[in-house]
Image: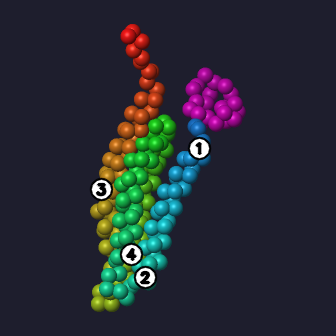
C-alpha cells in the first residue's frame, strides 16, 4: 500500500512499504450527538451560573443558583460518565473514551472556576476570589481526575463486557 493509498483509506501516520497502518474510523452521527450533548450540558450550567448568580447578588443566599447548577451538573456527570464511556467501549472506541474522560475532567474544573468567579464578593470582604479559586483548582484537580477516571473505568468495563458478550458464540444444547 502506498502512502497515497493509505491516506485515501483514512490511515494514520506515515507508512513505508510493508508497514502496517492503523485505520481511524470517523465518529458516527450518534457519537457526534452525544459529544454535542455533553458540550450543551456544560454550557447550560456555566450560563446558569454566570447569569443567575449576579442577578441574585442582593438576595440572602447568592450561592443558591451556583449550587443548583452544580448539583445538576454533578448528578448528570455521575450518571452520564459510566453510561457514555460504557457505550463508547461497547463500540470499541477506546481512544474516544480517553479523550472523553479528559474532557469531562477539564469541563468540571472549568465549571468550578466559572462558578467561583461568578459568586459576588460581599462589600465587607476584600476581593480574593481569584486566589481562592486558583487554590481550590489545584486542590480539586487530582480528586476530580480520580473520580472521573473511576467512573469512566466502571462504564468502560461494563461496555467491554457487553461488547464481549455480543461477540461470544451462542452455545445451544441440542442433545436433548
Q: CA distance from mark 1 to mark 2?
A: 40 Å
Q: CA distance from mark 4 to mark 3?
A: 24 Å
Q: Evaluate if marks 1 and 2 touch, with contact meaning CB atoms under 8 Å apart.
A: no
Mark closest to the chain's N terminus, 3 or 1: 1
Name the mark nearer the viewer: 4 or 3. Answer: 4
Mark closest to the chain's N terminus, 4 or 3: 4
* Mark 3 nearby-residue class (10 Å; few <14, some 14–19, many ≥20): few
Location of mark 3 (residue): 143
Q: Name the residue rendered at 45%, 72% in the picture.
A: 48
The label number, if any, that marks residue 28 in the structure image: 1
The label number, if any, that marks residue 65 in the structure image: 4
* Of the pair 33 and 111, the residue shown nearer to us: 33
Q: Which contiguous range is marked in magenta?
A: 1-23
Q: Name the residue rendered at 45%, 54% in the picture.
A: 103
In the image, residue 85 lies in the stretch drawn in magenta: no
Question: Can residue 112 be seen at all in this image of the molecule?
Answer: no
Amino acid at each position: 500500500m502506498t502512502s497515497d493509498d493509505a491516506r485515501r483509506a483514512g490511515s494514520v501516520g506515515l507508512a513505508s512499504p510493508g508497514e502496517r497502518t492503523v485505520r481511524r474510523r470517523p465518529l458516527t452521527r450518534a457519537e457526534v450527538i452525544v459529544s454535542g450533548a455533553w458540550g450543551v450540558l456544560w454550557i447550560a450550567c456555566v450560563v446558569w451560573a454566570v447569569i443567575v448568580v449576579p442577578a441574585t447578588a442582593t438576595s440572602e443566599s447568592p450561592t443558591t443558583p451556583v449550587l443548583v447548577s452544580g448539583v445538576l451538573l454533578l448528578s448528570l456527570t455521575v450518571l452520564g460518565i459510566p453510561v457514555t464511556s460504557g457505550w463508547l467501549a461497547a463500540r470499541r472506541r477506546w481512544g474516544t473514551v480517553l479523550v472523553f474522560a479528559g474532557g469531562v475532567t477539564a469541563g468540571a474544573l472549568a465549571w468550578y472556576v466559572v462558578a467561583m468567579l461568578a459568586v459576588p464578593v460581599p462589600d465587607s470582604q476584600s476581593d480574593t476570589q481569584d486566589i481562592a479559586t486558583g487554590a481550590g483548582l489545584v486542590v480539586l484537580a487530582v480528586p476530580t481526575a480520580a473520580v472521573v477516571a473511576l467512573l469512566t473505568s466502571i462504564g468502560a468495563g461494563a461496555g467491554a463486557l457487553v461488547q464481549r458478550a455480543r461477540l461470544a458464540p451462542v452455545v445451544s444444547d441440542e442433545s436433548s
